[in-house]
Amino acid sequence: KERHAPEGDYKLPWAKSPVVLVDTSGLEPWTAKACGRSTRFNLFHAGGVTHLVNEVLDAGYDPEEIAVVVPGEAQLKAVQKLLWHDNLTSILVATLQQFQNTDRDVVIFDLPDGPPLEVLRNLGGTEPDLARRLLNVPLSRARRQAILLCNLPYLRDKTPADAPLARLLKKVETDHPVVPLAEVVGQTPDVLKMWCDLAPGGYSSERFEKDLAESSGDV
């Protein structure tokens, strides 16, 4: 059951709909696996989430009214660190499993999947019943608005057409606005804007892995 705000009662100027898809493909984001684990992270998306949280706060929402939902622990930690860097420590960041039975006015659902990795198995079609249940969590628990952050063309290409994720994306594209993340960022002088200026052909996964290998001490 949807529990969104009445039509026209949306505070974000670029998001006048109960569900909005923010497409990151224009920034050419990439995904990497956490060392020694299958869970993955996407630094571009973590920066995008932080920017979106600040946009939602600037629109007049309280921190306690906002949640960020991600598929796994690696992306949760990446998002948390950037939010904490902005002193946004009261924003709830949770995995899909952790967010069940919780709700917020605005839910930002981050799907960090991107090249060079395949889409997560539990969302990409190999476990359809589980995928259906998990995908329902962030969208049904948003009291006013759900914002879906993803690399839309990549997920379209890599997800089987009959998978719950593919059907969800098709429905959102058909019924709700799709907004490029670069358009939302605009001229904002933050870390994400710097990454926007680097893309395309900028800070790649290969360069990140090289920098990580050459680094010393904690990262």
Image (cartoon, rainbow, N blue to C red):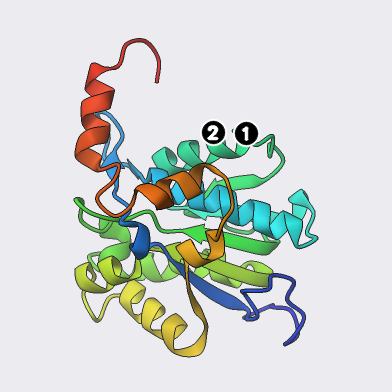
Q: Nearer the viewer, residue 126 or 105?
A: 105
Determine the secondary structure under disc 2.
helix
Q: Which residue is mark 2?
A: 81
Residue 149 at x, y percent in the picture: 47, 62
Residue 125 at x, y percent in the picture: 25, 69
Residue 135 at x, y percent in the picture: 45, 67
Q: Is residue 150 above or below residue 63?
A: below
Residue 87 at x, y percent in the picture: 69, 34
Q: Is residue 212 above or below residue 197?
A: above
Lateral position of residue 154 relative to residue 131, left or right: left
Quarter that holds the C terminus: top left
Q: Is residue 192 above or below residue 127?
A: above
Lateral position of residue 130 relative to residue 145, left or right: left
Quarter that holds the N terminus: bottom right
Three-letter code for the amino acid on which mark 2 is drawn? Lys
Q: Is residue 177 above or below residue 149?
A: below
Determine the secondary structure under disc 1.
helix
Marker disc for residue 84: 1
Lateral position of residue 113 relative to residue 53, left or right: left
Three-letter code for the amino acid on which mark 1 is drawn? Trp
